[in-house]
Image (tube, rainbow, N blue to C red):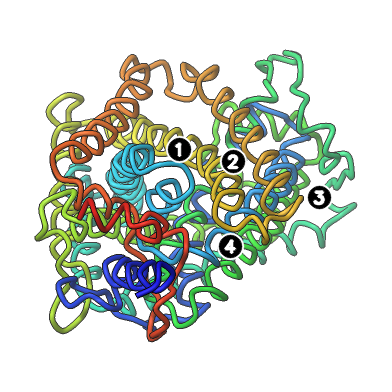
Amino acid sequence: MSATGARGSQADIGAQQFDVAKRDDVHKLHPKAVGLAGVLFLTVTGSAPITAMLLNTPYAVGNGNGLGAPASFLVATIILVVFSVGYAAMARKVTAVGGFYAFISHGLSRELGMGMGFASMIAYSAIESSLAGAFSYFLNLKLIELFNVNIAWPILGLIMVLLVSLCTFFDVKVSTRVLGVALVAEVVILAIFDIGVFAHVGSGANVQWSAVNPINAFQGFSAHAKLLAGAAGIGLFFAFWSWVGFEMAPNYGEESRDPKRIVPLSLYISVIGLGVLYTLTSWASVSGYLHVDDAIRQAQTNSAQYFYDPATRLIGKWVQEVMSYLILTGSFACALSFHNTASRYFYALGRERVLPSPLGRTHPIYKSPYVASIVQSVITVIIVLLFVIIAGSDNPTQQAYYDLYGLMALLATLVVMVAQAVVCIAIIAYFERYHASEAHWWKTRLAPAAACVAQAVVIYLLLSNLDFLSGGLGFAHWIPVIAAIAFLIGLGGALYFKQTDPAKYELIGRMIYTGADTSPVIEEAVFHSYESGEGLAKS
């Protein structure tokens, strides 16, 4: 046999080992289960539009940019669209449930991929507990309002975890239906709010074009008229925070009907769609007050009423009522979305046997990663109970909202921002190394580089404003340490496997899905080492 033929057969063996569609020893997810709408429902609800607006916009206005808060959302939209250019290009090449884990492994190294995979797994796992805090806080308020019944917030939070666990046990289609209803309802009520406010220009609303001037995204405001000063960095950070979740689209590639088309398209639709909605809604919220100082004062002193006041005054009490219910469904849907993603990280690491192999099992009927899902639910319960033990259960505002929701959301946001910055570098390296003929000056070079710098700025804003963002809670300073420990555990594990189990090391972050494609050449980057015979020798 010729050398070329030998290399070809080795490549075929490599392809068989890395392609989950061609392996009988791997439990597979439900292929072609969801279309474009399904992927959008699974990811956009992770960003939780109504939660992002009602919770983040008051901080961006009152403690950040004031009138320029909508400009922060506009700038964030532009930067994240730029990030999506390279991210979508990578998604067209690599279809893997591991998301960041797989992309970084392909572009940089298995060690970095596993390190960021562990950190991302911790982040997405923690954010479900964060949403349990938000859900229990808002539900407690609603129960007191309706029935004058005060149920301890941990009970409400654990009920949410149970319901999420039940939804994710079944086919992924169940989650898409639940999330689809929640998302449509959120978008509709926010659109009604926007239209209602802008329709009252000159008669209760004050629309100023300077609110969306990008320059104002980088300007705060001085203390005046008994108002605290605002810092531009805080406004920009809360704007970026509002998008956390959209980046999960590649994690559902293996379950989508046409991942090479659907995943990139869903990224652009979600980023641009959310950007338009966020910019308009934040602009409408500021415009709902006749004077910007009134908006800032409301945001600083009673942020819970920041949206409700103009909604009731300009549109009707019913809008406030609907919003007060949708903040509950939005929190639940967001938790469901992140639970699905966290489960798929556990599943990806389990099927590659980096974590215990049972995590890589799927249900024989529903094809859901049910073992990983159960583990994720247990972890969430443990986190909630730890907060109960440490902080208590008698003050939902402090314990459920500020402590559990705030601190766990900060942890997740930090890790996601770091992962996105590292992915940008991985995209550049991947195309230069494996697809040099397809490398593009904008898509795979300049866009990822610019996005990397922008993500680094967001990370700096988070760390430099950590005391404010955490409400002064001392635990916040352990957040970067926890993220670093998770990364180092993953990195150390990869180095250990490299020395003790080369075959397992070869699989780290490299198991991809090609569907029904029977072509032996799956993805040259995936089994590059096999083409030279190195990977085959190690196995």
Q: Decide: is 365 above or below 117.
A: below
Q: Identify the residue at horizontal 67%, vertical 21% (top origin).
A: 231
Q: Crowding near pointer 1: few (<14 within 10 Å), some, many (20+)? A: many
- Residue 169 coordinates in the image, percent (x, y): 19, 70
Q: Residues within 10 Å of mark 4 (few under 14, many from 20)?
A: many
* Residue matched to label 3: 204
Q: Earlier in the sequence, mark 4 or mark 3?
A: 3
User: Separation of disc 4 and disc 3 at Cα?
Assistant: 37 Å
How far apart are the alpha carbons under marks 4 and 2?
15 Å
Give me the C-alpha separation between circle 1 and circle 3.
36 Å
Please state, as top left, top right, bottom left or bottom right, where the C terminus lies in the image.
Answer: bottom left
504 displayed left or right of 244: left
Residue 332 shows up from this direction:
no
Image quadrant occupied by the N terminus: bottom left
Comes first in the chain, label 1 or label 3: 3
Between circles 4 and 2, the one closer to the viewer is: 4
Task: From the image, tell me which residue sits under label 1.
Answer: 413
